[in-house]
Image (tube, rainbow, N blue to C red):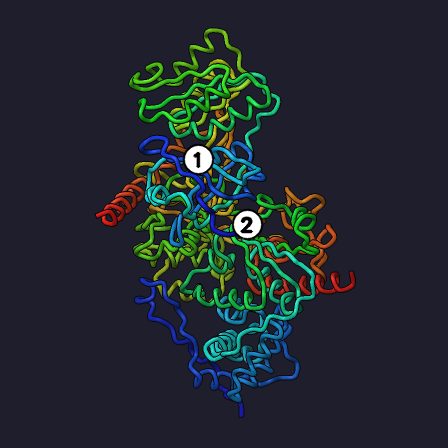
Amino acid sequence: MPNMSMVKNEMPSQDPNVRNKNFLEVALGYTEEQALDEAARCLNCKTRNCVSGCPVQIQIPDFIKEVAAGNFEEAYQIISRSSSLPAVCGRVCPQESQCEGKCVRGIKGEPVAIGRLERFVADYHNAHSTEAAVKPESNGHKVAVIGSGPSGLTCAGDLAKKGYEVTVFEALHLAGGVLVYGIPEFRLPKAIVQKEIDGLKELGVKIETNMVIGKVLSIDELMEEYGFEAVFIGSGAGLPRFMNIPGENLKGVYSANEFLTRVNLMKAYKDDNTTPIQHAKKVAVVGGGNVAMDAARCAKRLGAEEVYIVYRRSEEELPARKEEVEHAKEEGIIFKLLTNPVEVLEGENGFVGAVKCQEMELGEPDASGRRRPVAKEGSEFEIPVDCVIMSIGTSPNPLIKSTTKGLETQKWGGIIVQEDTGLTSREGVYAGGDAVTGAATVILAMGAGKTAAKSIDEYLSSK
Amino acid sequence: MSRMYKIIKKTELNPTVTLMDVDAPLIAKKAEPGQFIILRVDEEGERIPLTIADFDREKGIVTIIFQIVGATTEKLNHLKEGEYIQDFVGPLGVPSHVEGLKKVAVVGGGVGCAIAYPIAKKLHNLGAQVHSIVGFRNKDLVILEEEFGKVSDKLVMMTDDGSHGTKGLVTDALKELIESGEKYDEVIAIGPLIMMKFVCALTKQYDIKTTVSMNPIMIDGTGMCGGCRLTVGGETKFACVDGPDFDGHLVDFDEAMERGATYKEFERKAHEEACNLFKKEVQ
């Protein structure tokens, strides 16, 4: 008999007023009892709308059925057939617009907490599994993967399991891409990312850090001099955008990338760390995506008294995961919606003193289908702040494009690929993730890594 | 491919400036004057950019010269020959454009001379006439005098207090040379921001193209953080990928000086703490 409760089992979480002062994980995860109870809410319906909502088609009702029966390891095996990073995706996927958005239970009441169950299953596996990954016998083919974010790690893992000799090239000193420099510890503990990377190493994947492809070595050199027969480009969308408004170069104005990199990758949040970071008292984060929420919540945790999210559309259009918005509100982040900055004003000694904003209203829908914000005349006002964090999106880094002959890209920088294979305009060179789509989600990048791995396998085994 | 980066040679050029030859063959193979590397001294260290002072492609060596100004350079200076630097990545940035120049004034100030030297050397090797004007606070801080001498058709040494060479600023010497009728295709100025600002103000009067090398605060060096942004000709540029060389007549130096001081207080404290730590180790 299914559990007909209209609401999800609540996620045990740290108290908002405790967690907004530490960097420990916010959501604590279901207990076994909660997981069993939640899994019983799944009707195991025939249409499987949830599966069609999942970018990598995890067989959701099947894994939930195993959870309901208490077979947690079996549930993990079902998920891992489709997903390479379940512990990550269970935490960072926008489930409300994917699997859970299509769940029948969501029509009257709340959908099944698919994301929370995925996380439970992955954490259970990580805590209980003792078997080390077995390195498969090499098939003699060498593949290079550029970038160690979600698409690169997925592509590397899938190919290594098939016996390819995979080397991952990472530009920074630590592997993980956005999972380590971008998403904060309190949302995705770095130990989880490290475990995924260690798993790849057990499969024989080599990870080369400090390798900026396009500078240290080019793709042509990798293929001609180092014997890589195929290359996957998963270099992400790392280039921050600014608003080009006056005052944006004042001290105390950061890109979200810089702020988050200082906090997460460079560990500025730790007391004994020497990475410089401004401990601002009043912070305005411009933007409404997950990155904006992460930056705002990091600023709060670093001791800011007032942290604002300044977003030009309304709450409905906020691109961030719903859960992140709720968490941010609980932690005391102040939302200034329908508000757009027009100038950053100087305070003392060249530091930011305030951000001048305009009130906005929503007009006709634009190309993205969202209603276009229009400025209200004469509505300017100032928010006194000593730090402004720009979180208005990123574009792909031009480094690889400019150093790889014959690699075609879109005008805005995205690498052009065949959608069903990930193949670029260069033979043997594949691409996926944000480097192709522009800033998107972990799960989409992972899906693209899987697609490319499959194509690379077909390409090299028919060669 | 990647591994720890061994310090092959370490030389104290003066009490606050150190030279290190680092084993980094992949970087040495590609390095060009004007480019930089980013290093981390140890597992917990911050990332700092340092311009490549020299390189030997055959031996696989990259030379860095750094001034001890903060906690990281203090820690770096405590490494000995045969020890390793944790991370060392490059060559980053766009190489200096020196091809086709016939007569150039290379102006170096303080530790900036370490960056100016490889450019002077390359110009010399390409057959250009090189006039080097180098300035230091006093004779104890002079570096690379002999090296500059070898690659310069004319070398002018300036010190603030006159304890070595001529007393005065590099701008005084440059002005004198220009006034005496020397015609330069280009002036390349590398040193403290304030020096580059005044060199540019001077050359603007004579309408001589001037290139400067900017060294702002930086994290990744690949265009990811935007911390190194500058205003050049009214546009925002990233020093790490668009530079570090820029047209000096277009750079907003006042803004660059402000931004460079963002963490001044933080750096001072961190440096003091690092020094105290090393002192304790000695005791």
Q: Would you identify the image quadrant in which residue A30 lies?
A: bottom left
Disc 1 + disc 2, Cβ < 8 Å:
no
Q: Is residue A373 visible?
A: no
Please, which residue is most extreme toward the top here? B180
Q: Would you identify the image quadrant in which residue A332 lies?
A: bottom left
Q: Residue at x 62, y 68 (%)?
A: A55
Residue B70's x, y, as percent? Answer: 33, 41
Q: SS at mark 1?
A: loop
Q: SS at mark 2?
A: loop
Mark 1 chain:
B
Please, which residue is most extreme toward the right here? A462
Residue ID for mark 2: A211
Q: Quadrant of the C terminus of chain A?
A: bottom right
Residue ID for mark 1: B215
- Above or below, comparing residue A67 to residue A228 in the picture: below
- Residue type marked 2: Met
Label 1: how many residues lie within 10 Å, few (<14), some (14-19) or many (20+)?
many
The foreground one among A258 and A200 is: A200
How far separated are the C-alphas under marks 1 and 2?
22 Å
Decide if residue A438 is on the left or right side of residue B197. right
